[in-house]
Amino acid sequence: MFSVMTPDEKLLYHFFLGTGCRDHEVTFASWADINFQKQTYTVRSKPEVGFFVKNHESRTVRLPDRLIADLKAHKEKAHERWIFSSKGQAANHSLRRLKKIALRAGLNCGTCKTTVQKGSYYKEQSVAVSCRTDPVCEHIYLHRLRKTAATRWLEAGKISVRTNPRCSGFWPRRN
């Protein structure tokens, strides 16, 4: 899937994989949350934009070296508050974008069918579509990236399920 991504898309989804964060935790990631010296990302609520961390518990995530290097390069050309922005706003719709990328990469299962709204604002209609031709595959979802991050940390010995049984405990420690 990464082979068909643009550089900005690669950074976004590497961020998901490197942090194990949830959709809105990535959407509202700001440059102020990144500590380049400690190589960390602090997930914190931003009530001014209506974002609150699950269980209202801020936490700090260690970032892989490669992700830190990519973020530094991205910051040089970024002039926004948000790491991932569109027209000055936090860029959301990461799942919709991931589904479009999966369709481009030819990774959809081809069997999912659903109904979507198409047409103009004044003349919308429900249309049946398939994931063969539209980005609607039900097998593509963001939480898989979170699970993959946790699995990688577990396999690398950076977390222990026995000592960190809660999902929010799935953050790697330095060796």
Image (cartoon, rainbow, N blue to C red):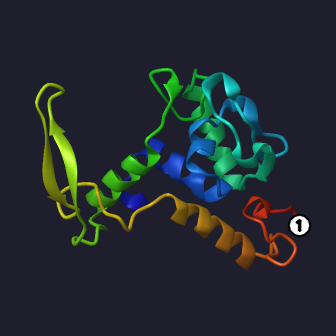
Q: Position of residue 133 (x, y in %)?
A: 17, 58
Q: Quadrant of the N terminus?
A: bottom left
- Residue drawn 75% across the image and 48% down it: 55
Relative to 102, is 153 on the left or the right? Answer: right
The number of callouts visible is 1
162 or 40, nearer to the observer? 162
- Residue drawn 79% across the image and 76% down it: 161
What element does badge 1 sit on?
loop
| Mark 1: few/some/many CA within 10 Å (<14, 14-19, 20+) | few
Relative to 79, is 150 on the left or the right? Answer: right
**Residue annotated with mark 1:** 175
Relative to 156, is 106 on the left or the right? Answer: left
Q: Is residue 16 above or below residue 109?
A: above
Q: Quadrant of residue 65?
A: bottom right
Q: Position of residue 4 (x, y in %)?
A: 35, 56
Q: Is residue 39 in view?
A: no
Q: Quadrant of residue 117?
A: top left
Q: Position of residue 166 (x, y in %)?
A: 77, 66
- Residue drawn 84% across the image and 78% down it: 162
60 or 166, nearer to the observer? 166
Q: Position of residue 38 (x, y in %)?
A: 85, 45
87 or 169, nearer to the observer? 169
Q: Is residue 33 above or below residue 153?
A: above
Q: Is residue 26 in view?
A: yes
Question: What's the amino acid at mark 1?
Answer: Asn
- Residue drawn 66% across the image and 32% down it: 30
Q: Quadrant of the C terminus?
A: bottom right
